[in-house]
Image (cartoon, helix red, strand yellow):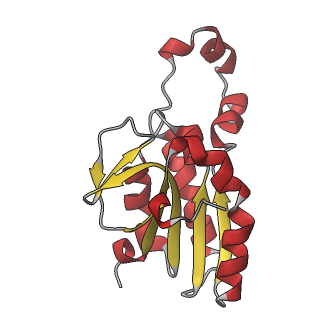
């Protein structure tokens, strides 16, 4: 199976981010109950940690309109996901769940992240994706131009975020 076939997108409205995160333990419990491994890659702290360690952080905060992360943040995100996929716990029966993408909105493209890590995945890669899906087109945070990707969509219409 190719990397593209091992990627799942759990698509939900951006306003539901907190509710989805609160339900992560349920995702984990059900995954473990089905005899699959569960590994979470949380990218929430990537931007603040990168900014706080940046040599020009004071200048960035003084004039944020000139700030550009270029590909540095994406490179860090790719490295985190690849490390999780290569870890001891990761195998063909594991699910690697990526959370915290909303914090990186406007700093990197999800499509690029997926393309760069998809071949590192031996089990399944679950992308918790705040946005929308229609006709194989995913739109991140309901704002970016959509990208066509062949991942398996899991949409909020399928009730994974309702009580």
Q: In which quarter of the image is residue 55?
A: top right
Residue furthest toward the bottom?
Answer: 35
Res. 149 image quadrant: bottom left
The residue located at (45%, 61%) in the rendering is 157
Name the residue at the top extreme. Answer: 62
Residue at horizontal 55 percent and vertical 47 percent from the top: 101
Q: Quadrant of residue 102?
A: top right
Q: Can residue 89 be seen in this view?
A: no
Q: Which of 84 and 17 is in front in this view?
A: 17
- On the image, the x and y values in percent for residue 11 come to 47, 57
Residue positioned 59% across, 66% down in the render: 97
Residue 66 vertical position relative to residue 33 in the rendered view, above or below: above
The N terminus lies in quadrant = bottom left
Residue 4 percent across, percent down from the top left: 35, 71
Q: Is residue 60 left or right of residue 48?
A: left
Q: Position of residue 17 (x, y in %)?
A: 61, 47
The answer to which of 125 and 115 lies nearer the viewer is: 125
The vertical placement of 67 against 18, above or below, is above
Is residue 69 in view?
yes
Residue 148: give x, y in percent of width and height.
26, 56
Identify the residue shown where x is 57% and y is 62%.
81
For this rendering, which residue is in front, 153 or 72?
153
């Amino acid at each position: 199976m190719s990397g593209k076939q091992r990627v799942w997108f759990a698509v939900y409205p951006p306003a539901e981010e907190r509710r989805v995160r609160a339900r992560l333990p349920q995702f984990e419990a059900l995954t473990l109950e089905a005899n699959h491994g569960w590994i979470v890659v949380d990218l929430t702290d990537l931007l603040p940690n990168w900014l706080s360690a940046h040599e020009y952080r004071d200048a960035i905060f003084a004039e944020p309109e000139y700030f550009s992360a270029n590909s540095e943040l994406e490179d860090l995100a790719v490295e985190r996901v690849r490390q999780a996929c290569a870890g001891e716990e990761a195998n063909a029966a594991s699910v690697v769940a990526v959370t915290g993408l909303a914090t990186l909105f406007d700093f990197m493209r999800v499509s690029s992240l997926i393309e760069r890590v998809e071949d590192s995945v031996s089990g399944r890669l679950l992308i918790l994706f705040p946005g929308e899906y229609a006709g194989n087109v995913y739109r991140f945070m309901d704002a970016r131009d959509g990208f066509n990707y062949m991942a398996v969509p899991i949409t909020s219409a399928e009730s994974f975020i309702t009580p």
